[in-house]
Amino acid sequence: MSVERVISKKAIEIYDRDLRPLAEKLAFELPVRAKEPPGLPNVLFLGNHSSGKSSFINHLLETDVQKTGLAPTDDGFTILCHGDQRDTFDGQTITSHPSLPLKNLNHLGPAFLSRLKLKTLPNPLLKSFALVDSPGMIDAIGAANTREYDFASGVRFFAEKADLILFFFDPDKPGTTAETISILTQTLAGLEYKLLIILNKVDLFQNIRDFARTYGTLSWNLSKAIRTKDIPHIFNIYLPEHRKSVSEHGMPGIPLKDFDISRKEVIEEVRRTPTRRADNVVSDLIHAGRRLSMHARLCNTISLDYRKIQVKWMAISGGLIASAGVSAWGAFQIWPGWEIATGVGATITTIAICTWFWGRRLLKIFSENLKDYETLDQLFADTFRNELALQDRTDLNVMWSGLKETAQKTFTILKPKDIPNFFSMSRSIRKLEGLLDSDIPKLRRAISETNTDPKS
Ligand SMILES: Nc1nc2c(ncn2[C@@H]2O[C@H](COP(=O)(O)OP(=O)(O)OP(=O)(O)O)[C@@H](O)[C@H]2O)c(=O)[nH]1
Ligand SMILES: [Mg+2]
């Protein structure tokens, strides 16, 4: 078994042994992945139409397997994988094939399947990973008119399975199509760590000023669309076989030598896809672990606040009951006879019962308020008061905005009284944080050591 597979297996073990039981106790929905995906590692190509996705695939495989052209060329997804001979299969055939993990695609409907293809070709690169080409993104009005299937669901399906996602832009449309923005902000949310951003066709820039302007626009658009602490690295590339000649250009353009290096780096990343799979399993684990830890700490605050209310009102009503007895006895001493003593005792007991009901009502209101985003925001601020006071923790805020909806759903099922007690929760949180600080980073280091080991 390869080192990568051993690491993936260890990561999955931690997931099942340590994360899953705590998540179940706290009704927390763990992300679906964080298990070794079936099938070959694969690379998904996304991006604006005509940005060069299919041309890049042809360049990588050194053959013209995909059609290319300036008008929107691909209208469906194409999976490219290894086969002894060149062949093309249609969507219906591949989704019903027992050895391909594509059965779930059926739910995207016949319009999607009729545009889905699988191509096989005898290329050695495809022995270690598959490629998925996609239709280019267009502006919303055009998209609504021409696509007869749910494009975003198709993208999400392949993106969840992908080990690497190459997102293409070109100088014409540096991030501005409506569809691109919605795919980046919504469909790919939580999968950003798989993304490589590519600005293709840099040979079209006539001077460095044009390049800087477009690069700046792309960065600005990405910073609004990708909700992570750091924007993914942008690789600026061109494909030599498509380079515009000086006569077409009119001007010599910008020096391209550095961009050749960038292209080679991207190709190297694509070749590293099998290793990235292990890396992604570990990333999924870290992602799930951090979210679970945040959720567990929030549950802890909720449980503490809930128990504070419970103890306070139980103590008040308990105290009143006790004082009812004492007061009745006192009244009896002052005004011998049962009437006054019983009256005093009964009045205070009634107040105690009312107080007890009042306490219960407050607990109910407390539980009800957990469905409210404002209350949850306040609980988040209370739980992470120290961390947020010390420095700007964009990472925590970003994670919280992605988690809030899940948390709200959770608290419709999980009642504060069912949250394990403070000691058990603190123990689980300490253990989880230990895993996140030490055991899981060790797995990550092991992966990078395999990458740098010249024998590997
Ligand atoms: N100048 C230049 N043209 C390129 C480059 N890469 C691709 N092209 C051209 O861009 C056009 C579109 O390329 P495709 O590969 O079909 O683009 P795509 O992203 O697959 O397009 P859709 O399938 O429609 O989404 C083709 O005419 C290519 O010749 C490049 O690096 N430089
Ligand atoms: Mg294409």
Image (cartoon, grey):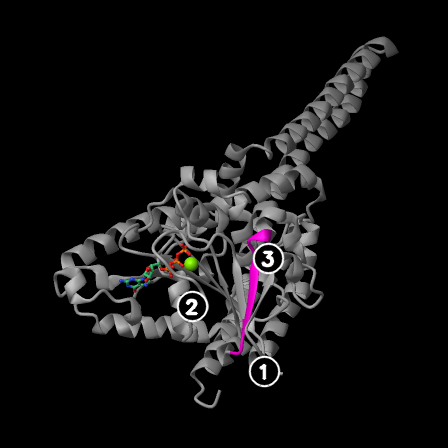
Q: Residue furthest left?
A: 251
Q: Is the C-beta of the residue carrying label 3 under 8 Å from the nearest atom of ligand 1?
A: no
Q: How many marks?
A: 3
Mark 3 neighbour class, 10 Å CA radius: few under 14, some 14 to 19, many 20 or more: many
Q: Classify mark 2: helix, strand or loop.
A: helix
The three-letter amino acid code for the residue at tag 2 is Ile
Q: Which of the two discs, 2 and 3, labels the residue nearer the N terminus?
A: 2
Of residue 277 and residue 16, the one placed in the foreground of this image is 277
Q: Of the numbered discs in the image, which one, if any, rests on residue 2?
A: 1
In the foreground, 40 or 192 = 40
Range of magenta residues: 114-122
Q: Secondary structure at mark 1?
A: loop
Check residue 119 for magenta coloring.
Answer: yes
**Marks 1 and 2, Cα distance to the nearest angstrom?**
27 Å
Residue 244 appears at what percent x and percent y?
Answer: 23, 64
- Amino acid type shown at disc 3: Ile
Q: Which residue in the protein does label 2 denote?
A: 57
Looking at the picture, which amino acid does disc 1 mark?
Ser
Residue 74 showing in the rendered view:
yes
Residues tagged 3 and 1 counted as in contact (Cβ below 8 A): no
Respond yes or no on whether mark 1 lies under 8 Å from ligand 1.
no
Q: Quadrant of ligand 2?
A: bottom left
Q: Residue at x 72, y 29 (%)?
A: 319
Horizontal relation, residue 81 to residue 181: left or right: right
Residue labelled with disc 3: 429
Res 359 quadrant in image: top right
Q: Is residue 96 left or right of residue 261?
A: right
Above or below, 392 relative to 364: below
